[in-house]
Image (tube, coloured by chain):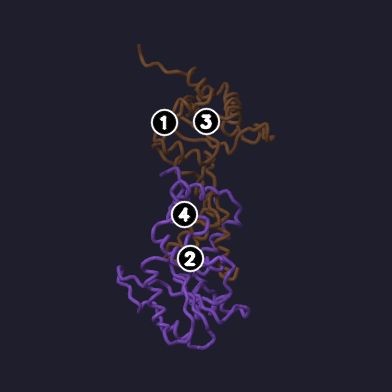
Chain colours: A purple, B brown
Amino acid sequence: MDAYTDSLERLISALGKLPGIGRRSAERIAFYLLDTDRDEADALAQAVHDVKTKVGHCTQCGGLAEGETCALCANPRRDRSRLCVVEKPKDVLRIEATGGYSGLYHVLGGLISPADGTGPETLDLARLRRRVDEGEVEEVVLALSPTADGDGTTLCVAEHLKGAGVRVTRLARGLPTGASLEYANPGMLADALRDRQDLGS
Amino acid sequence: MDAYTDSLERLISALGKLPGIGRRSAERIAFYLLDTDRDEADALAQAVHDVKTKVGHCTQCGGLAEGETCALCANPRRDRSRLCVVEKPKDVLRIEATGGYSGLYHVLGGLISPADGTGPETLDLARLRRRVDEGEVEEVVLALSPTADGDGTTLCVAEHLKGAGVRVTRLARGLPTGASLEYANPGMLADALRDRQDLGS
């Protein structure tokens, strides 16, 4: 369209590929960037570039890192006796955001999914086993999604850690805090009933 | 936060400054960019950079241009006898999107706003008058927002074009197409009544 310049059209189309950004939002952001001061726009362009060039995977946990080791694995104040197994790097952020965990992480990088033909061999469970066998770990917390693939992977990882001499746990199941009982589905309610908690007698 | 790397945190914070993008969306987009292929991310970074370096203003109409003249002013098939006066470059896109206008544009770059202390001198109306006096123009269509500032500016521009020997018009007022009469405000309805259209007799 004549009314757009080439650069503007390219920016709108690049923005429109981002998740949750439609054509209208992309136009709005493009015009915002056109009007904003140069430093802010440069910071954004540089940040996009840096994320693709500098961010890699931690050689220890498989999470995100700039350099060899991520800040969590390098932090001497983290509790090395606990290892939380998650599917992807973003899950680390969600668990960190609770403020309720001070151990280390292990990022699997995926789940076993029979429907997609992804077997246990894709997850490099031997690497996890080596970390556990190094001796400091006392408990492995499996924090995978409560889905068919997540539960399957949880069972498979637990099986793989048999004989390692560590406690293996998984996240609790129950009603999601803040939700109404009315909207709980039967599976959720069945889990909540089975794992009901004592309030004393 | 330890769980983010520096580059990722910088990207999330740069994205979070964009209009309509909150912290959660910024995180989602940042992780998308982290996972997407390098070319797509580079295209975005480059596009942001280009928009700030290459896009300037057309020396003729004041709209967006890369180089001296915008594609609309340079297009020999545009009708040079009509000039549509708009507030900002984005308005050109909106009018082009209707497909109902084939003339040229003149971008004022703002509106007169007594409340903000912006007077007629900020709009360089002499430049508009020079374009009109060059002789090709037969009609000036004032396409400013139907607000107090827009209407004030419309009157002032019309006043400024007195004696130039051109027809001066403004966009029609009435009910917005697709809206319900029930939600029309009194001013809208009054305009629609006054400018009612003949359907024949």
Name the residue rendered at 49%, 35% in the picture. Answer: B105
Q: Which of pointers 1 and 2 indicates the residue nearer the eye?
A: 2
Quarter that holds the C terminus of chain B: top left
Q: Quadrant of residue B196?
A: top left
Q: Nearer the viewer, residue B80 or A51?
A: A51
Label 4 element class: helix
Q: Residue A182: give x, y in percent of width and height.
A: 44, 51
In contact (CB < 8 Å): disc 1 and disc 2 = no
Task: Tell me how far mark 2 sits from mark 4, CA to CA.
Answer: 14 Å
Q: Nearer the viewer, residue A94 or B92?
A: A94
Residue matched to label 3? B134
Residue matched to label 4? A181
Residue matched to label 2? A196
User: Which comes before the other along the chain, label 3 or label 1?
Assistant: 3
The residue positioned farthest toward the front in the image shown = A201
| 1 and 2 marks on the same chain | no
Residue B138 visible to an observer of this rendering: no
Q: Residue B12: give x, y in percent of width and height.
A: 55, 61
Q: Amino acid at mark 4?
A: Leu
Q: Which of pointers 4 and 3 indicates the residue nearer the eye?
A: 4
